[in-house]
Image (tube, helix red, strand yellow):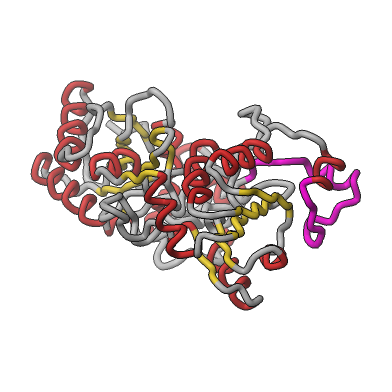
Amino acid sequence: MERRTGTVSRGIRCPIIREGDDLAQIVCTSVTEAAAIDGFALRDKDVVAVTESIVARSQGNYAGIDAIAKDVKAKLGGGTIGVIFPILSRNRFAICLRGIAMGAKKIVLMLSYPSDEVGNHLITLDQLDEAGVNPYSDVLTLAQYRALFGENKHEFTGVDYVDYYAQIIREAGAEVEILFANQAKSILTYTDCVLTCDIHTRARTKRLLKAAGAKIVCGLDDILDAPVDGSGYNEAYGLLGSNKSTEDRVKLFPRDCEAFVLRTQALLQAATGKQMEVMVYGDGAFKDPQGKIWELADPVVSPAFTAGLNGTPNELKLKYLADNDFKDLSGDALKAAISKRITEKSGSLVGNMAAQGTTPRRFPDLIGSLCDLTSGSGDKGTPVVLVQGYFDNYTN
């Protein structure tokens, strides 16, 4: 009988993961037991996706604020440090900021406006228009910001991040000065030692600062890129992708993910006889239409994935074929014509009108976003997601 379902995304319940657990074996057992208990078959090209959080937890990849402070002081001198373009997040940045401030005498905090890099707004575009402020060129002091815009609390958290971040810095023992600007070089009026905290634009920001004469330039990816007094670390991303663990410790983005996905794939093949794909995923890459927040606060959606997940979709748009090439057909004749066109496609469809509107994103980014939405970030207890039928098409 013809299969009537296409892509299916299932959250897989797992035990609570602790440091030192054999996560690859736990993932394999959890997936195979779920299939047996819930009565679904595992197939070739199924994707098993594991959230970065439990990978890092199994690795014990944590660091305390003392380690952050020590690394910041060693790399940026411990005097006046410009901290620029951080995202507005209690989970993602507040604990990092405590450690950064502990490694400095003074922090000049430069916030982008009207929003941070991932869409958390300090103010609205309408407020900027009404105030006659040009965000591309105008640099505002804290006094000017307050006079123009007053207190602005985050739509979802209710936090005034300007006041909150200033309080964190003072409580860590550093002086604080706050300004608002969108040009990286604006910070150099205040200090030539700069820690840039942007995520996806960090390489450009570093380049611009160095070209403008900055003495020391580091990014969050340069802090804890190696162990400090036995701390966790990430050689590629440093503090990027970290999350709050406790009030004085962060969980870092996982490392050595390539070895993990390959071992998990091998265990699954040994247990099921199926060639399944495996990936580690973090934040999905999508935007919330209400709060205008772009979800991707991690440096990448997927830090590692098996070879079968390389590439991008190469698909025909069924509605285009139905409305154009085969507009005079219907029923079984239409189905047969479209199926034939799909089976005959070869090579890249880039530029083909029948492929317009298909999503030209990488498979790990697409599937990782699906998995992030499936697993959630709260109490679902499904840090592993099984995606089936993703590589199917209308003919399968």
Q: Quadrant of the N terminus?
A: top left
User: Quick check: is 124 in the magenta stretch?
Assistant: yes
Q: At x 74% / y 47%, what residue is drawn?
A: 114
Return the residue nearer the eye: 153 or 274: 153
**Which residue corresponds to the image point at 60% horizontal and 54% vertical from the top-left?**
106
Query: If the image is split into quadrants, where does the C terminus sit?
Result: top left
* Residue 112 visible in this rendered orientation of the protein: yes
- Residue range in magenta is 119-142
Q: Is residue 214 above or below residue 374?
A: below
Which quarter of the figure has residue 43? top left
Decide whether residue 321 is among the magenta residues: no
- Residue 81 lies left or right of residue 367; in this view the side is right
In the rendered structure, the answer to whether residue 390 lies left or right of residue 209 reads: left
How far from the left and from the top, in percent, is residue 145? Answer: 80, 45
Q: Position of residue 257 (x, y in %)?
A: 27, 53
Q: Residue at x 41, y 61 (%)?
A: 345
Residue 354 in sight from this viewpoint: no
Viewer-nearest residue: 15 or 37: 15
Q: Residue furthest left?
A: 270
**Relative to 309, is 211 on the left or the right?**
right
- Residue 270 is situated, as x and y percent measured from the top left of the image, at 8, 45
Decide if residue 142 is on the left or right side of residue 212.
right
Q: How many marks?
A: 0
Quadrant of res 185:
bottom right
Residue 35, placed above or below residue 141: above
Q: Judge by depth and name the residue closer to the eye, 3 or 220.
A: 220
Along the line of sight, the residue nearer the viewer: 259 or 321: 259
